[in-house]
Amino acid sequence: MFRALLILTLATGCGPDATGPVLSPTDGSTITAPVIPVISVVDSGVNAPSVRIFLDGKNVSDPKTVVRTVYNFMGGERHMVAALDLTEVDPGEHELEIRTGRWPSASSVTSTFTLAPPDGTVQLRIEDEDGALSPGRVYIFDADGPVELASDGTLVDHNQRDADQNAVFCPSGECMAWLEPGDYRLVGWRGLAAELDIQQVSVSAGENRFDFTVPTAIDLTGEAVSDLHIHTGKSIDAWIPDTIRFAALNSVGLDLYVITEHNHVTDAPGRAEAAHPDPPAQAVTGSEVDLRLLRDNGDGHAAAGHINVFPLAPEAPGMPDYHKDTMAEVIHDHLHLGSRQTLAEVDDHVVLQLNHPRGIHFHPGDDPEGVWQVFDWRGFDRSLPPGEGVNEWMGREHEGTTALDFHVLEVVNRFSMPLYREVRADWFSFLDHGIYRTASGNSDAHGLTVELAGMTVTLVEADREDDGSIDLNQWIASLQAGRARVSTGLFVSIEAAGATPGDTLTDTGSVSVQVRVQAASWVPVSEARLISRSQAVWTHAIDATERGADGSLDVTYTVDVDLGSEDGWLVAEAGYPLASEPSLEELGLYADLAPGYVPLGFTNAIRIDADGKPGWSPSPRFSSARSSGN
């Protein structure tokens, strides 16, 4: 039996007790995956440049290794996170050794594992309708359901975000998997706007190859499919090595994503390029900033919420402190970053997004967690204008800035329909009180399978530069103006007398509104809705007869709406009735590909200025008595 020695040398001069246990692969585990995370506890003095990896005495260092510290409630340890490619390693027992310190006084820790690859090697190729290689992923099922591709002993995420991994990532359009001989259902996938290629195959021992043609279903020209909230192994609550993290991000139909580590700024474009040269999706640097605010009783600072700030200069120096007395101070400091902290090519503009203001939903089968929910922590009464009563904190100023001076509200966070219903009502109440904020939807992905990047996206109007990249100046302007829509599989658009989201319509009386709903054949939908001032003014049940011969949906409804003589707004939405969620039977294959998710789509708002007065003012932004306190 072949026996190999893998040595990770952390040459930093650490003390003899510096090395902690190996977390992945765990001692005695059996590895069946071709690429695995290698994670170990290391000394506080260890940094990524000092990490070297050897396999059988040969240097196989992963240049994308990261080192970071974990949340205190998860142990507070410092971890090294790397990836190990086993595709050319012989089966059998192996010993992993991690060393810290300088030879000969270096300390070490070992972990033994057995590499037992399945007998079938499967080469996969994904093409678009024109026969061109295309990034995508391949889902794998057998007669019992999803096939577990990750190896036991390598899943170390405390929140189990990587359980039941059954997709292979193909960022270049070509990839491989190891499978036991047998019968499988393979599903080629290129994103929410594409159809599927579903194949029933038999895998034999030895080499196998399967080609997929996955045609585009919905033309998204002029929009950037974006995810504004993504974490990597640099975050203190994520465990995915860059090799795997960026392969996944480049395989899910995104045009652009924002890397938002917790209170930390990294070179996202550089890391993306290192992990996958010439990546098909555009990486933008951002940061998810804690709102650690002073309690009303003055008893110290507490965790209140999160905001995302982007785009930032790679590894921007001297970011502001996030421990402040008020949310207005945090917003102010991050709105007024210096030129060394922002991205020069976007004219020093910055976008602030308020994340998950009603909390976080970690697992579809559980209830949402009461953490990082600023609207609950501070108190928010939707019936009152921001700035009044329990909402007084929203009106407090700091150097002319208030807690509401962010640009984007994250209305959908990962898969959570319960929290969507809550934040949707918050967003609508803002609009009812004359506060226009762009609504977004994002994955908040820390792992690969529970929080699925590419399954909750924000589509932002933007053209491409001559080199094919997104025009970031236009993208930012569109996002801040509301020229965006959200999708977890349904694509909804709206036009009212020539106005689209982000516009202001000055008509009065009756107006003709066009609501368009599109979906690939595998994405189910129950109804379309038109919302005006928080009320559904039109609902239409969508049935199978409205779908095309191939099962795809592309239908436009014309609705006559009486705008009246008061200022208001219009939003179009499609999905399932909000009072309940669809069954697994109703969701069908969609539920297999995205467990816990529900098809949804909605637009941002068209303002209605119908009162004949200057400006759009459904009601005053704040009460006349504004606090100047901090």
Image: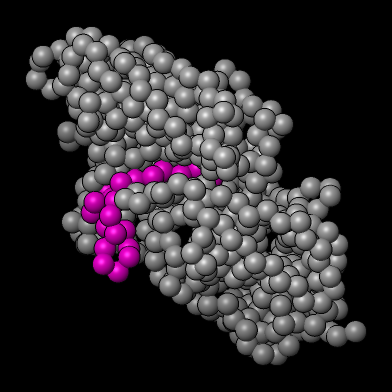
Compared across the picture, whether 163 is left or right of 47 comes to right
Assess whether residue 122 is covered by the magenta stretch: no
Q: Residue at x 27, y 11 (%)?
A: 562
Q: Residue at x 73, y 88 (%)?
A: 56
Image x and y of residue 442, in percent = 47, 43
Image x and y of residue 257, in percent = 42, 54
Answer above or below: position of 124 versus 248: below
Magenta segment, which residues?
A: 453-476
Q: Which residue is more in the foreground, 121 or 204?
A: 204
Q: Residue at x 11, y 14 (%)?
A: 612
Q: Can residue 452 be seen in this snapshot? A: yes
Compared across the picture, whether 501 is left or right of 420 comes to left
Residue 348: name its quadrant: bottom left
Answer above or below: position of 205 versus 102: above
The quadrant the C terminus occupies is top left
Task: Tell me how many marks there are.
Answer: 0
Q: Which residue is more in the foreground, 293 or 241?
A: 241
Residue sitting at the far front: 549
The quadrant the N terminus occupies is bottom right
Image x and y of residue 613, in percent = 10, 15
Q: Which residue is more in the foreground, 570 or 67?
A: 570
Compared across the picture, whether 85 is left or right of 95 comes to left
Residue sitting at the far right: 1
Q: Can residue 618 be seen in this snapshot? A: no
Assess whether residue 467 is covered by the magenta stretch: yes
Q: Which residue is more in the foreground, 495 or 281?
A: 495
Compared across the picture, whether 24 is left or right of 285 comes to right
Image x and y of residue 115, in percent = 81, 74
